[in-house]
Image (cartoon, helix red, strand yellow):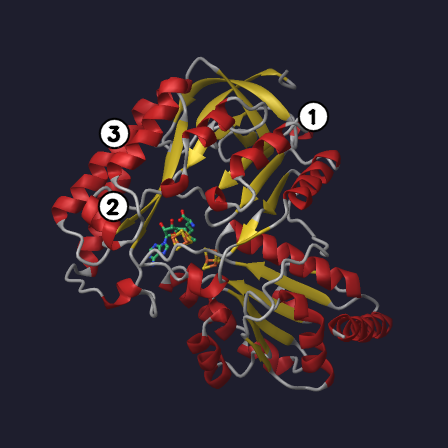
Amino acid sequence: MENTVKADAKARLLEYCREYAEQNGHPPLAYVYSFGCQQNVSDGEKLKGQLSLVGFGFTDDTEQAQLIIFNTCAVRENAENTVYGAVGGLKHLKEQKPDLIIGICGCMAQLKHVADKVKSSYRQVDLVFGTFAYNELYAMLCTVIFDKRRVFELSENSTDISEDFVQIRDSRIKAFVPIMYGCNNFCTYCIVPYVRGRERSRKPEAVIDEVRKLIDEGYKEITLLGQNVNSYSYGFPALLREIDKIDGEYRIRFMSSHPKDATNELIDTIIDSRHICKTLHLPVQAGSDRVLKAMNRRYTTDDYLKIIDYARSRMPGFSFTTDLIVGFPGETEEEFEMTKALIKRVGYDNIFSFVYSRRSGTPAANMPDDTDDKTKGLRLRELLLEQRENIEKLFSRFVDKEALVLVEGKGRQMQLTGKNDEGIIVEFDGDESLIGQFVAVKINRFANWALFGEITKGKAE
Ligand code: SAM
Ligand code: SF4
Ligand code: F3S
């Protein structure tokens, strides 16, 4: 029954796009923009895949678009404000072009208070749908186009994983492959479990098959995605080992890895692999055990450091990156100093640090918070300065050594840019024809944001 509804809606949209193309000399164009994390980018690629199947073309210019979709993020307040700003800016365009369709989807759209606000204050928006409704895109578009009704679809009923999708990927070099959806961890500050639902894992065969196809198509870097890949139902290290058996010239990355479930087996699998980058993104969030407990992270700094020490005992240069939150409710100056001490102790190749953002509906939103915004801002700056000092020491380990770099595009300071195994930007001179290939680069200097060097081999062995 459901499939018939989808097929009917698909047929109507195919007809709509065909007629539109006949009248306008080109297909209706869609502008799809994804905010937030890689999972969202991947969802955006699937939305574009669905649109392409019924005949939509794509544009980067909202003025040319017949359909505009913002695929949104709710993780911090400023992510939400950016979306309200972007949608507010389209009011004029909608007045000039009443049959323009404007949609908001993704994590922010899953929140009822957001949908209510859009319903009453952003009349230019025709379509709001949450993270469970991607598969119903055709039916929703039909309601907007043919019935001339606004659609608000926030139900959480379709939690099945659909393997029946087409993707229009943003890159020809790097690809995202979700291995699971949702999150069960309920860290007290985080909105993700509320907008993405419970954990659902894809079957290993489906993941391996997708990765194999990407490698055959020439993709060079594949990033496996999940909010906590370590709780992948079918065993994450085993999945990694199966993927690593695929022959070819490619590298594997993954994120995120929750420290409470990171094991020595995971570290061994990475170190003993042929294709997995020797780096681990291991979000610690804070350096104080009291704060970690209040965050419901379910590990102590000691547990965390054991993973780091094990990896470094097997491979001294093993690289770590992390996420950090400053200004969590009740965080004292002393506790903040513990975070600084932790980043010094670990020596991260990169940190992603955020000022705590209050998310309504999460437990932390009701915790007393007596630190003012200015102090929180200063703590963030201090953390970045601390990291900058550490980087000087850390990056020197790459100098005079050769790095394997996947060339991604034109550089900021030199002709080309790419990333090494550890995910650090490397710039060097070379021909643009190298974009999309691995090259060996001898590093001769660095800044706090990149390494610089010279190609030693056009193509690394
Ligand atoms: N699932 C991943 C994990 O646990 O490592 C994290 C995913 S979350 C989308 C990315 C990062 O956003 C988190 O690691 C955390 O540092 C940050 N974050 C989440 N909620 C936040 C909040 N309310 N305020 C500030 N930063 C937040
Ligand atoms: Fe959010 Fe925690 Fe889940 Fe990560 S593990 S998505 S921080 S609740
Ligand atoms: Fe990602 Fe933002 Fe949603 S970080 S999972 S897009 S809330």
Residues at marks 1 and 3 touching, judged by CB atoms closer than 8 Å: no
x, y percent for residue 119: 50, 83
State how far apart marks 2 and 1 are (Cα).
Answer: 44 Å
Which marked residue is nearer to the observer: mark 2 or mark 1? 1
Up-down: is 292 above or below 303? below
Q: Nearer the viewer, residue 49 or 93?
A: 49
Q: Image quarter for residue 330?
A: bottom left
Taking the image as shown, residue 385 lies to the left or right of residue 138, namely: left
Q: Nearer the viewer, residue 260 or 367?
A: 260
Up-down: is 299 above or below 405? below
Q: Nearer the viewer, residue 225 or 70?
A: 225
Q: Which of marks 1 and 2 precedes in the sequence?
A: 1
Taking the image as shown, residue 55 lies to the left or right of residue 206, namely: right
Crowd rating for badge 2 (residues with CA inside 10 Å; few <14, some 14–19, many 20+): few
* Residue tagged 1: 247
Label 2, secondary structure: give it: helix
x, y percent for residue 414: 52, 29
- On-image quarter of the C terminus: top right
x, y percent for residue 4: 79, 73
Q: Is residue 410 visible?
A: no
* Residue tagged 3: 345
Q: Image quarter for residue 1?
A: bottom right
* Residue tagged 2: 381
Residue depicted at x 53% and y 84%: 123
Callout 1 amino acid = Asp
x, y percent for residue 176: 60, 45
Q: Which of marks 3 and 2 precedes in the sequence?
A: 3
Label 3, secondary structure: give it: helix
State how far apart marks 1 and 3 are (Cα).
Answer: 37 Å
Number of numbered tags placed on the structure image? 3
